Amino acid sequence: MVATGTPQARAAAPGRRRVRSGRVGYLFVAGYTILLLLFGVVPVAYALWLSVTNSSGQLVGLGNFTRVFADYRFGSAFAHIGLYLTLWLISLMVLVVTLALMLHGRLKRTSAAVRFICYLPGAFAGASSVLIWLILLDPVASPVGPVLRAVGWHSAAQVVAPENLPVIFTIIAFWTGAGSWIVIMYGALNGIPDEVIEAARIDGAGALQIALRIQVPMLRKWIAYMLILAFAGGAQLFVEPQLVGTASFGQVPDDWSPNQLSYQYAFVAADFNGAAAIAVVLLVLSLGCAAVAVFKAGLFERGHS
């Protein structure tokens, strides 16, 4: 037995602290790991199994995939979501980063109030946000009705026409989701050492050059992280088109997005295998895009930039 206070005990103390720290770390992640297994890994494995079997549990290979690919609704659903994601991700990347840079720079005195105002819409649940926007986009009931009528929209049906939906859903998503990302980007900008910015100023760099050549490159991991989560959330769009379709009395088809189409397969046609095939396609697309973002941005590399 080694007595406390001896040189041997003092040498062994850091090792014991590391072991205890490691155990505490495992305890912290244990809850998340269990939930991830129950509500992430197991459902994915079950969807994979359903996607390659039929209703009798017999393996059918890629039969379910070829069947849903041949569905005339499949291409249009993915085209809709592709256009929406393009608009959503570009607006998110450009506007969020620009607003965060402005708040961190020229608007620093009022940035706390502006960040709070930007964050407020995110407090609304997704469904309630859509209902608010349904009122705002109705030229009869909306406080901005004169503006809508001035651009030629005189009824809600004209506003929520299917060709306008990607833009409308982009506005709703930005309104509800951009505020929290502005706060996160602002925090990331605070992490850039002042010495780096000061050295650039001494070298004669202006605000735009500092933003484009120093701050944005040093934010690239955060931007990649934002795009990964936004893509994953946007690809699963369901509530917005479903509510707009109901409010417009069927003007928006109930298979507008892939998630809606999957819902139709599962709960209207009772074809859970076809629904699982669509879910797996969405999963593969999301993982593929996330992998590209991770490797391009060096998301898991050590270092500040």
Image: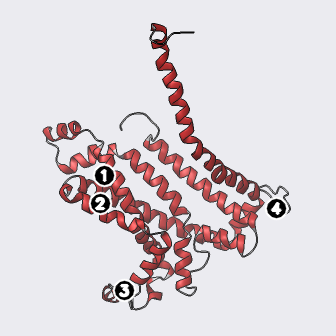
Q: Above or below — where is 254 with respect to 29?
A: below
User: Which residue is identified by label 4?
Assistant: 54
Q: Which mark is residue 153?
A: none
Q: Earlier in the sequence, mark 2 or mark 1?
A: 2
Most foreground residue, 167 or 247: 247
Circles 2 and 1: CB distance less than 8 Å? yes
Mark closer to the observer (4, 3): 3
Q: Earlier in the sequence, mark 4 or mark 1?
A: 4
Measure the C-alpha gap from mark 4 to mark 1: 50 Å
How many numbered circles are shown? 4
Label 2 Cα crowd, 10 Å radius (few <14 / some 14-19 / many 20+) = some
Question: Is residue 101 visible in this depiction of the protein?
Answer: yes
Label 4 Cα crowd, 10 Å radius (few <14 / some 14-19 / many 20+) = some
Q: Earlier in the sequence, mark 2 or mark 3?
A: 2
Q: Above or below — where is 245 with respect to 229?
A: below
In the rendered structure, which amino acid carries the disc numbered 2? Arg
Mark closer to the observer (2, 3): 2
